[in-house]
Amino acid sequence: MTARPPITPAADAWLHNAQQEIDSLVPPNPGLLPHSRRGFLQASALAGFAASVAPTGALQAQVITTSAQGLDAGMAQIPTPTGAIPAYRAKPAGKTGLATLIVAHEIWGVHEHIKDVCRRFAQQGYLAVAPEFFHRQGDPNKFPNMAELFANIVSKASDTQVLGDVQAAVSWAEANGGAKGRAGITGFCWGGRIVWLSAAADISGLKSGVAWYGRIRSTVNEANPFHPIDIAEKLKWPVLGLYGGADSGIPNSDVDEMKTKLSFGGQASQDSDIILYADMPHAFHADYRPSYRREAAEDGWKRCLAWFGKSLKA
C-alpha cells in the first residue's frame, strides 16, 4: 500500500479551516462516531444516504419518501468534454417538452435525499436532473474523515469544471425530454453556491435559479476564485435565495450585504430576492438531518415551486 505524503504545515492549517467550515454546516449525528472511519462507513451503508449524515433512530421517521409511480426515474450518463458523468433523473413518464430543473447536490454528492428532491419536482411536471459533480474526484469512502473528504474531493471540483457540467446537464436534458431554453437550477448548501455562480456564467438554456442556504463568501483559492458576493451585481437571470437566520456558517451580515449588492446590479440582480427565515439553522430543508425544520422547509418549497412556475412557464 502506497504511503500518503506527509501533510505540510500549510496544508494542515487548510484542513483545520476546512474542518471548521464543515462543522458549521453539519449538525452532529449522535448515532455515528464523529469523524471516525467506522462512523463514515456505517453511514455509507444506510439507505443510500450521505456518508456520516445518514438518518438513524428517530431521524428516520421524518425522512420524506416520494413515490416514483408515474415517473421515468433512474440513473443516466451525461456526456461532457472530459468524459461522461453519472446523474439521477426523474420526469413524468411518457412526457416531453418539459421545463428542466438541474438539482445541485450538497458536499456528499447525489444520495437518496437529492434523488427524492428530483422525484418531487418530477411529480410537479418537471424533468429533474442531479449530476454527480464529484465523479472525477474519486470515491468519498476512501477518506477516513470529513476534513480529508473536503480537501481531496470537494475542494478539487473546480468552479470551471462544475459550471461546464451544469451546461452539459442542460444540453442532455434538451435532448432527453426537456424543452429548449426552459431550464432552471436549484441547489442546497454547496449546491446553493453553484446556483449563484451559474446565474453569472454563460450557460445556454438556463433562465432561473433557487439557492438554498448556499455560502455567500468563503476562502478564495485557485479552484474557487469567486463567490456569490463577488458576482451579485452581474447576474444574467434572477435567483431566489432561501437562508436561515440562525445559520452558524452564513452570518446575517453576509445575507444583508448580498441583498445590498443585488440592489445595485443589473435588472436580473434587482429582480432577485432573498428570504431569511428567522431562527432557522443551516440545512433546514434537509429532512434526513437534525437541522430539518418542517415549517420553513415547506414554505421554502412552495416559494421554490412558485418561482420556477413563473419563470419557466411555457
Image (cartoon, helix red, strand yellow):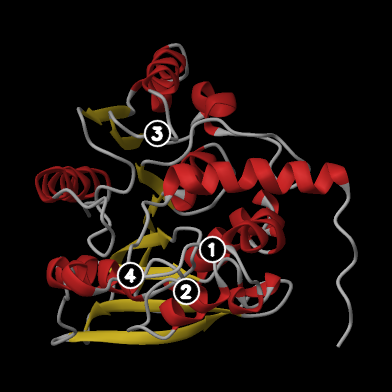
Residue at 46% across / 52% down in the picture? Answer: 191
How far, Cα to Cα, is label 4 from label 3?
22 Å
Crowd class of label 4 (few under 14; some 14 to 19; many from 20; radius 10 Å)? some
Give the residue type that dot 4 points to: Gly
User: Residue 203 has which mark?
Assistant: none
Pair 1/3: label in front: 1
User: Residue 31 has which mark?
Assistant: 4
Q: Is residue 118 left or right of residue 148?
A: left
Identify residue for label 1.
35
State which tag comes first along the sequence, 1 or 3. 1
Crowd class of label 1 (few under 14; some 14 to 19; many from 20; radius 10 Å)? some
Q: Is residue 180 above or below residue 273?
A: below
Residue at 57% across / 61% down in the picture? Answer: 146
Secondary-structure class at tag 2? helix
State which tag comes first along the sequence, 2 or 4. 4
Determine which quarter of the picture holds residue 255: top left
The foreground one among 165 and 64 is: 64
Give the residue type that dot 1 points to: His
How far, Cα to Cα, is label 2 from label 4?
8 Å
Identify residue for label 3.
248
